[in-house]
Image (spheres, rainbow, N blue to C red):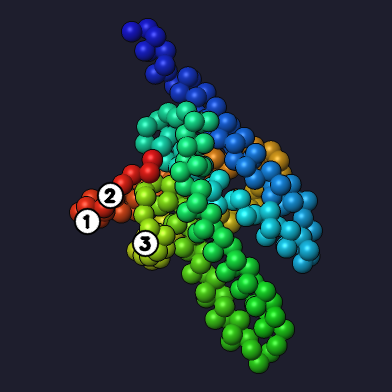
Amino acid sequence: MKKKDFFNRPVYIALSYVYYFFAANVLFLISNLVFIIVYLAAEPNIYSYMLLFITAIPFGPSISALLSIMGKLLKEKEIDVWKDYSRAYKDNFKQAFKIWIFLLLAMGILMVDIRVVSSIPSYKFVGAFFLGIMLILMLITLYAFPILSRFYMKTVDIIRASMYFSIRRLPTTAVKIVIIIGTFYLLKYLGFFGFMFFTSIIAYLIMFYDRGALAELEDKLKKDGTAKANA
């Protein structure tokens, strides 16, 4: 009984979460070390942007794995960080990589197109059109990886569900946009320290705010008889 009481004490629980967040950050850091170094050292020029684009390629599977273990921590209150991260990374690698490459390439091409047409006054309306497409891709990104981290679904169904929830749960979408934008500025300001301590906390917050959407999706999949949990 005393041993059980010890493990239920607030101090022990708090220290456990500190360990979970820190250890998850270390694994995420290792998975994206080259990108993080380039991001922190990048200057605002075309060459840095190209290098960032290339080094961001491994980001998809690693963010999917991080979201997966943070979602599990949210549900079960404890995780085996190395085992759960490795399993999620391996299980979701192929699909996360395909989705991320598609989004990364599409947004990269759109950024170049926007830069080109913005210099031509008569084509500014085309730039607005490209910005609209980029916004849609960003909204898909906000939900695609949390969904992928939780369920086994076809890629096209993940994209459809992401578009649906980005509109269906607009307040949550707005909160997530603020979180993502704030994260970029926070990590740029805090540097390596930020990546070591805050990335997994941000992932935890995203999964926290996505609870309603993921529960709604799970109910729908169960009704359709296609529910298959990923974590």
Reading the image, the residue beneath label 3 is 157
Q: Secondary structure at mark 1?
A: helix
Kind of residue sitting beneath label 1: Asp
Q: Is residue 134 visible?
A: yes
Q: Residue at x 70, y 88 (%)?
A: 120
Say few, some or many: other residues with alpha carbon within 10 Å of mark 3 (under 14 / 14 to 19 / 20 or more): few
- Quarter of the image that includes the N terminus: top left
Q: Is residue 109 left or right of residue 103?
A: right
Reading the image, the residue beneath label 2 is 227
Say few, some or many: other residues with alpha carbon within 10 Å of mark 1 (under 14 / 14 to 19 / 20 or more): few
Asked which quadrant contains residue 50, the reply is bottom right
Q: Is residue 114 left or right of residue 147?
A: right
Q: CA distance from mark 2 to mark 3?
A: 13 Å
Q: Residue at x 42, y 16 (%)?
A: 7
Q: Residue at x 36, y 61 (%)?
A: 157
Marker disc for residue 224 = 1
Kind of residue sitting beneath label 2: Ala
Dot 1 and dot 2 residues touching (CB under 8 Å): yes
Which is nearer the N-term, disc 2 or disc 3?
3
Percent from the top left, x then y, of residue 31?
62, 42
Q: Is residue 166 above or below residue 20?
A: below
Q: Is residue 166 above or below residue 24?
A: below
Marker disc for residue 158 = none
From the viewer's side, name the closer residue of 14 and 127: 127
Q: Is residue 107 left or right of residue 85?
A: right
Q: Secondary structure at mark 3?
A: helix
